[in-house]
Amino acid sequence: MSAPGPVAGMLLDGVYALRQALGRGAAGQVWLAEDILLKRPVAVKIVPPELVGGNSEAWRNALRREAAAMASIRHPNVAQVFAFGRHRDLHYFIMEWVDGETMQGEIERRRVTGDRIPVRRALRIIAEACRGLAAVHRAGIVHRDVKPANLIIARDGRVVLIDFGLVRMPDGGGAGGAPVGTPRYMAPELAKASSLPSSDELHLADIYSLGATAFEILTGFPPFPGEGAREVIERHVHEAPSPPSARRPDLPPIVDRLILRSLSKKPRERYASCEDMRAAVAAVAARLRPTEPTPSTPRVLVVDDDADFRTFVCSFVRRLSPDAYLYTAGDGSEALDVARRVQPHLAVLDLNMPQMNGLELAEALVTYPETKATRLVVVSGESGQGERARFEKLGVMKVFEKPLKPILFMECVQSALA
């Protein structure tokens, strides 16, 4: 007799208390849960026992391998995987709980009012999704279920990729050889298990799914709507997609070309990698007139390798300026790229960061013409007199020590945005 399925109140391994079911699909169920030892919310993905089936040992080994690879990913645009375990017959992943709204939720909300996502914001979302998916691919993982419902706009402004698809069995498919994914966004080569691509081409299916997701972010509709899964899959396999501008006439031809390339039927005609696609998105964004945000709308960049601290700082900025555009980065190198693109009014920098520290970043920001006018505030766990003197010479408004004193910090931010 099989063990009962997950229910609210169930305690997995004496640590994770299931609170609320968030979603269900062929690849598993996702729950909001509480880690009762660390007193924090987590997301739990539970693998259906029927997927393990007769290949239980092969599946367990595959799940363990993928869990180890997923847990190695540390990226601001990817939900972190904390643990993998087994409770009776239930295998589960413990993941970062990202508080925010899914892209699907925003699309559906805007569809009701006829309000479209501004083009430049849509391109930023797509670019951040590319960054996250590139990090997943670098870890040797293929997501297999990229779609608007698996992108969350976190409260700190990050775009976060969630809910990794299940591992493939050695035959390439899911349970019983079935394809893994969501028909609305599934690459044509995944429609039939008999024609699954080789492992070195499988990431190109993710790029197709990201292209279908990008189409919907820009237009409010998927590239191939349909009444049922079979009809939608047939359209993905046999029909050429219409350009996004057919749904949204204000989109220029360069946006059409960007999206249609990612939706090529032949995998090798798509972008070769997510980094290539991100570069193409950035090039398109650079060629569009910067009409949003308006010059009067504050733009604030928060840079810290601690995601919790970024969220903490963003909450203060949001309290002072609810309409501000918030941008975040986890290291100095990424921050410089973002800053030169968005030209923030204010940048809040951590001092100690990988790749490029806060002092090096501040020196770069005052050098480039695009960011010369950006006001700088530094937050540091420890900074010496020499570093403070160099910051002062660079024109930094203020250097704050951690832990941050909220009132003084908010007064400084308010002054910078005035």
Image: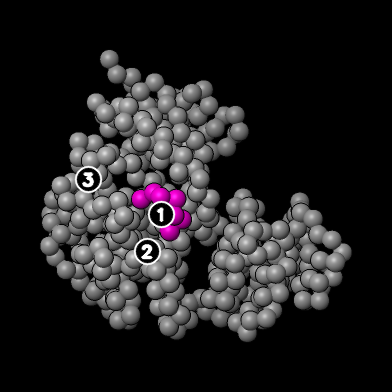
Q: Which mark is residue 74?
A: none
Circle 1 — which element?
A: helix
The amino acid type, in three-letter code, at marker 3 is Pro
* Residue 266, horizontal then vertical, whole percent: 21, 64
Residue at horizontal 12%, vertical 62%?
238
Residue at disc 2, secondary structure? loop
Work out whether mark 3 precedes mark 1 in sequence or the reverse, and give the earlier one.
1
- State the colouring used for the structure image: one colour
- The stretch of residues the image draws in magenta is 134-142
Residue designated by label 1: 137
Q: Earlier in the sequence, mark 1 or mark 2?
A: 1
In the image, residue 21 above or below residue 334: above
Side (left or right) of 139 relative to 368: left
Q: Amino acid at mark 2?
A: Ser
Distance between the Cα atoms at labels 3 and 1? 19 Å
For residue 273, the mark is 2
Choose between 44 and 247: the one closer to the eye. Answer: 44
Task: Determine which quarter of the picture holds residue 258.
Answer: bottom left
Please tell me whether mark 3 sits on a helix, a strand or a loop. Answer: loop
Please say whether residue 39 is one of the residues in the magenta stretch.
no
Q: Is residue 414 visible?
A: no
**Residue where numbered disc 3 is placed:** 179
Q: Quadrant of the C terminus?
A: bottom right
Q: Is residue 101 above or below residue 124?
A: above
Q: Amino acid at mark 1?
A: His
Q: Furthest-right residue in view? A: 385
Identify which residue is drawn at 21% across, 50% down.
196
In the displayed structure image, the side of residue 24 where residue 67 appears, left or right: right
In the picture, measured across the screen, residue 205 lies left or right of residue 417, that is: left
Q: Position of residue 32 (x, y in %)?
A: 46, 38
Query: Are dots 1 and 2 in contact, CB under 8 Å?
Result: yes
